[in-house]
Image (tube, rainbow, N blue to C red):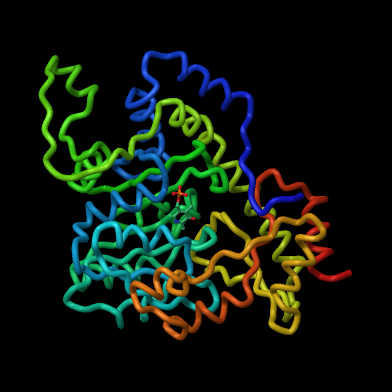
Amino acid sequence: MIPYGKQIIEQDDVNSVIEALRSDFITTGPKVAEFEKAICNFTGAKFAVAVSNGTAALHCAANAAGIGTGDEVIVTPMTFVASANCILYCGGIPLFADVLPETLLLDPAEVEKKITKKTKAIIAVDYAGQPCDYDKLAKIAKKYGIILISDACHSIGGKYKGRRVGTLADMTCFSFHPVKHITTGEGGMIVTDNAKFAEKMRVFRNHGITTDYRQREEKGSWFYEMAELGYNYRITDFQCALGISQLKKLTGWISKRREIAERYDGAFKGNPDIKPLGVSSELTHAYHLYVLRISQNIGRDEMFKKLRNAGIGVNVHYIPVHLHPYYQKNLQTSPGLCPVAEEAFKEILSIPMFPGLTEEQQNLTVKLIEGD
Ligand SMILES: *Cc1c(COP(=O)(O)O)cnc(C)c1O
């Protein structure tokens, strides 16, 4: 089976983990800060907070943005459920704004239509690895005094108008799940240039306690206080050691992903029934996913079955969030709310995209899709 995505773990990655396991600290130790610093260097952001997974990263960011009971947050439906669930964790109300038909990225005009006095934040998702139109989104956020959160779980290493993902929004969230660009098994990170947000997130990931164990050790003090309700969203040192090692390879892996995308683009060019998503020329796409739209003439589900039967691990990203039963039941969302996303949902198919994909595997995939 050729999967749609797969991690690469090499001997040096394994060595880093072993070294961390044999050190004095296996959690909340120096590797955490080292990984945070490395992500700051890579993204160009000032502060980074490492957490246990990407969903925790989104929850930390939503909390730092001040989202509370009854606050409205505008989010895209074309994403994994975690992008919207983090709003619910804070007692907020997700409002789904539709996407652009070419890229399936949040449509800034639709965002602006959804803004009310209760709007606290926008959560934009760089779907498939393509950064959203952050100039337009930031302008809207500024105009209404609301916070812009980027769910960049697909787009680490991407760029928008020459600026790196991680510097495009008030807070940017990453995931290090094995299907993402780099992995720590489970893991996540938030980057920001705002010192107050960073501090809030550090406290939130540690039960709402104002000092961590190491800070107390350094001061020679037993004293700690819980100032607000937080969670245990800490990540271990051996996971961060893996992340540090993986991050060194990210640039090369993104080049590989972009080469694979270029070959796919060439192969499907001019086929009206099999269309890659549109890509803006103003950015560097990080290609977490390579998404095709299979016309309703051919049928996405037929194509899915054919490829799965041939051992190609294609997938569908995503069922629009507002169509999930929980959302329909508890937030009274229903079909028709985001027609562009819903129409795209009938046609989208993610095909294999990961740096280890060989040219033969790619040719086989293309051949099967083209049907000859
Ligand atoms: C993977 C992902 C998440 C959640 O990350 P986890 O590390 O699995 O919790 C959130 N948003 C998007 C867009 C994702 O792809």
Q: Position of residue 126 (x, y in %)?
A: 46, 61
Say if 87 sits above or below 242 in the image.
below
Say if 232 sits above or below 349 in the image.
above
Q: Position of residue 299 (x, y in %)?
A: 72, 78
Q: Residue furthest right?
A: 372
Q: Residue furthest front?
A: 329
In the picture, residue 68 is in which quadrant? bottom left
**Residue lying at 37% horizontally and 65% vertically, measured from the top left:** 134
In depth, the one of 165 and 35 nearer the eye is 35
Indicate left or right for 93 with 229 as reference: right
Say if 214 sits above or below 137 in the image.
above
Indicate left or right for 353 with 87 as reference: right
**Residue lying at 50% horizontally and 63% vertically, measured from the top left:** 127
**Residue lying at 34% horizontally and 23% vertically, measured from the top left:** 30
In the picture, residue 147 is in which quadrant? bottom left
Quarter of the picture containing the C terminus is bottom right
Q: Position of residue 246 (x, y in %)?
A: 53, 34
In depth, the one of 110 and 81 nearer the eye is 81
**Residue lying at 78% horizontally and 59% vertically, measured from the top left:** 365
Q: Position of residue 357 (x, y in %)?
A: 72, 47
